[in-house]
Amino acid sequence: MKLICLEEHVLDGATAAASMPAALKAAPYLSDWGKTVKDGNRPRNRPQVIDNADSLRKGMDWTGERLADMDAAGVDMQILSLGGFPQFAPKDKELSLAQSVNDRLAQTVADHPSRFAAFATLPWGQPENAVAELERAVKQLGLKGALLNGRPNDHFLDAPEYAELLAKFNELRVPLYLHPGIPVPAVQAAYYSGFTPELTARLSMFAWGWHNEAGIHLMRLILSGALDRNPHLQIISGHWGEMLPFYLQRLDDSIPPAASGLRRSITDTFREQVYVTPSGMLTRSHFDFIYTLLGAERILFSLDYPYQSLDGAHEFIDSLPVASSEKEMIAYKNAEKLLGL
């Protein structure tokens, strides 16, 4: 069966060099993990965490090793997006770096049109420039939307200065992928610090902290009315919805429309304007819940390469207890429809 994966990252040397000093200042624990032996008990038919050096090498190699890994795993297409923390780049370099990455993404897609499509990166700290770059990336370069790694700056996208940018996504009818990023520093210090450096780093980031932050980001967008105001805006949320789906009923019970001022319940908003994807969390219990909540038409597929391997992709799809037609929707048809592939 054809597979299209939507949370598959590339890295850019110039962007990393420009952004990492500020990112490390905000989150010094970024470099504190990876020193322990990997869990040898993780099933081999699920994606494996790739160590820092290998994931860096694979991320920098946009086509060669990536295509070989895709072929070996039977992945037909990746939707490429920039990894890292580009919004930490100096403001005077943010636009030019984003434009350079988007140009290279477009060229990579042009060179391999059956294997790659791409989400743009934007100069998120400059909302007016972000609007213009999104329009250029979509209309001139043919990119399929944009991906944001964490917060655009000190605020989330529900801040008033991002209203025009969200309206541009709505106008262009391209999705916004809300990817996790480092937690607000004060939150990280209060909630996740105080353990060994390795444990603090893992808890702050990919074990819990940045997923919680991504879920809060999406919840704030919903509660702000941004999705009500932009009915064509579609959000993609990885890691099975970044915790939020599992509390939707509680949110509905606690914040009905009479309290929120929204025209729909929080759950109905989610069901109509959010897609979820596993990001390599190929676990049946997560799938069963999300499938019951959303149905197959709102589930996309992803493996989180190069931070995780491509192991087990076909096995997971094949094992799902749904009709073949719904497996096809999850594996590739929903992505083709959403992205116009």
Image (cartoon, helix red, strand yellow):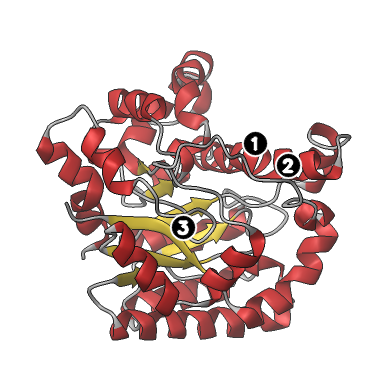
Res. 166 mark: 3
Q: Distance between the residues labelled 3 and 2?
A: 28 Å
Residue at 46% x, 79% y: name it: 102
Task: Please tell me the numbered disc located at residue 208.
Answer: 1
| Viewer-nearest of discs 1 and 3 | 1
Instruction: Using the numbered discs, state the Cα–Cα distance from disc 1 to disc 3 in whole angstroms.
Output: 27 Å
Q: Nearer the viewer, residue 315 or 237?
A: 315
Q: In this view, does 142 lie to the left or right of 88?
A: left
Q: Do the residues labelled 1 and 3 touch (CB within 8 Å)?
A: no
Identify the residue at image location x=52%, y=57%.
163
Say which element carries label 2.
Answer: helix
> Where does the image place residue 4, in percent across and percent down from the top left?
28, 57
Q: Which amino acid type is shown beneath numbered disc 2?
A: Ser
- SS at mark 1 in the image: loop
**Percent position of residue 263, x then y:** 38, 31
Question: Above or below — where is 147 with respect to 184?
Answer: below
Q: For the residue carrying disc 3, how many other residues have a C-alpha within 10 Å: few (<14), some (14-19), or many (20+)? A: many
